[in-house]
């Protein structure tokens, strides 16, 4: 199961889950990881995973008045009274973000918590959060990285990175179905979710990058008005983004009855992945003396090693015109080799990976078999 599919599965738990069994926190894994990286408080006390009310109450506490949530909060953490007061004082802030797979995991957890406890607070907060998601969509079908965040120049960009577009759309498909834990969602809201899905799916197909008339994969973010690929953070220049595009393809393959446009988008993306794998190389990690940076502590360094026995890798960023790999530093400078990236970004960012491998080897063949049967029936 790919990362995207695994997260969606974690977000929609079985209705038969025992009341004693903890609700999954897998949907928050990215946020929690970033919280630990930011704070270095690896021994921070947490509520037991089985304490649904305590975790759901934390999620309620962090929810802003506009219905969204700031990213990188740790919902399981035991908060001090001083921290709770500080969070309450920030309720009116417009600092919600879909970054790092945020907002839809909170709504999903609250929906499960409502199902388990019948506490109307969780239901109402989930509905308010869902309204925030729907209202954040642009008319063209896209979702911004961080709606209304004046502190982020890239906040309004339509974003695929960190699974904003595919994550939100996958979540809305679960909402629209009306299946538990979303069986309390009003019909008009489910209709609005279905309409949002139609617009979002169409935009995904529209934004697949073409190079010399051949469809490839997707950029990480696009300007909300011009739809041109744009930079986000200083080290995220406009590019074809491999890791992010795998989640897009996984989402497209999750559509029960895909259109011909969806099928072609998947086929073209998989063809690009196959063509741009870098053979006979691997990443080697080695220990270094710890170096503390603003966003993480570097305890390892990385280098690219030639290895005839290695299955090969993909770079994270590829040029929009040539499909050649490239790399960047936090100051925005572009370099052509991993060894030219400064330690801060070389140790704190994954520049190479095997992200498309399971998609190509397992999920894509399974998908072809499934749609082949379906299209014979159609």
Image (spheres, rainbow, N blue to C red):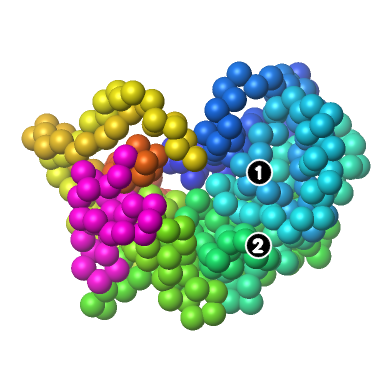
The verdict on residue 256 being magenta is: no
Mark seen at residue 179: none
Which of the 4 quarters of the picture holds residue 281? top left
Q: Residue at x 45, y 51 (%)?
A: 247
Q: Is residue 226 above or below residue 147?
A: below
Give the main secondary structure, helix, strand or loop, of the magenta stretch. loop
For the question of whether residue 128 can be seen, the reply is no
Which residue is farthest left?
A: 308
In the picture provided, is 134 more to the left or to the right than 142?
right
Q: Nearer the viewer, residue 359 or 318?
A: 318
Q: Nearer the viewer, residue 284 or 199?
A: 284
**Mark sitting on residue 149:** 2
The residue that appears at 64% across and 54% down in the rendered structure is 97
Residue at the image position 58 percent from the left and 32 percent from the top: 39
Residue 355: x %, y % from top left: 34, 44
Marks 2 and 1: which is nearer the front?
A: 2
Q: Which residues are magenta?
A: 315-343
Residue 130: x percent and y percent? 75, 56
Q: Earlier in the sequence, mark 2 or mark 1?
A: 1
Whole-percent x, y for residue 135 in the image = 73, 67
Q: Residues within 10 Å of mark 2 (few under 14, many from 20)?
A: some
Task: Report which quarter residue 208 is drawn in.
Answer: bottom left
- Residue at screen point 86% across, 49% down: 124
Residue that numbered label 1 is attached to? 105
């Amino acid at each position: 199961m790919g990362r995207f599919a695994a997260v969606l599965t974690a977000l929609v738990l079985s209705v038969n889950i025992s009341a004693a069994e903890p609700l999954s926190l897998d949907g928050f894994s990215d946020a929690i990881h970033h919280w630990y990286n930011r704070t270095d408080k690896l021994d921070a006390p947490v509520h037991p995973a089985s304490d649904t009310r305590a975790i759901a109450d934390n999620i309620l506490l962090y929810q802003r008045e506009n219905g969204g949530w700031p990213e990188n909060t740790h919902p399981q953490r035991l908060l001090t009274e001083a921290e709770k007061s500080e969070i309450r004082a920030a309720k009116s802030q417009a600092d919600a973000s879909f970054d790092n797979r945020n907002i839809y995991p909170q709504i999903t957890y609250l929906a499960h918590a409502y199902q388990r406890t019948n506490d109307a607070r969780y239901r109402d907060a989930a509905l308010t959060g869902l309204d925030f998601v729907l209202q954040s969509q642009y008319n063209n079908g896209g979702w911004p990285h961080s709606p209304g965040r004046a502190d982020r120049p890239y906040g309004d960009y339509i974003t695929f990175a960190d699974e904003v577009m595919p994550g939100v759309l996958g979540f809305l498909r679960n909402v629209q179905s009306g299946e538990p834990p979303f069986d309390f969602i009003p019909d008009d809201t489910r209709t609005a979710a279905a309409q949002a899905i139609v617009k979002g799916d169409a935009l995904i197909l529209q934004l697949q990058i073409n190079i010399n008339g051949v469809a490839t994969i997707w950029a990480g973010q696009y300007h909300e008005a011009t739809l041109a690929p744009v930079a986000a953070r200083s080290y995220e220049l406009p590019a074809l983004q491999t890791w992010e595009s795998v989640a897009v393809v996984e989402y497209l393959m999750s559509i029960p009855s895909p259109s011909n446009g969806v099928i072609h988008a998947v086929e073209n993306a998989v063809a690009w992945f196959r063509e741009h794998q870098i053979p006979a190389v691997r990443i080697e990690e080695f220990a270094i003396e710890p170096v503390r940076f603003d966003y993480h502590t570097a305890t390892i360094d990385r280098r690219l090693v030639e290895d005839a026995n290695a299955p090969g890798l993909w770079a994270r960023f590829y040029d929009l015109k040539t499909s050649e790999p490239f790399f960047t530093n936090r100051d925005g400078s572009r370099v052509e080799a991993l060894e030219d990236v400064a330690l801060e970004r070389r140790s704190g960012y994954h520049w190479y990976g095997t992200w498309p491998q399971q998609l190509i080897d397992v999920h894509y063949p399974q998908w072809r078999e499934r749609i082949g049967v379906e299209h014979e029936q159609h």
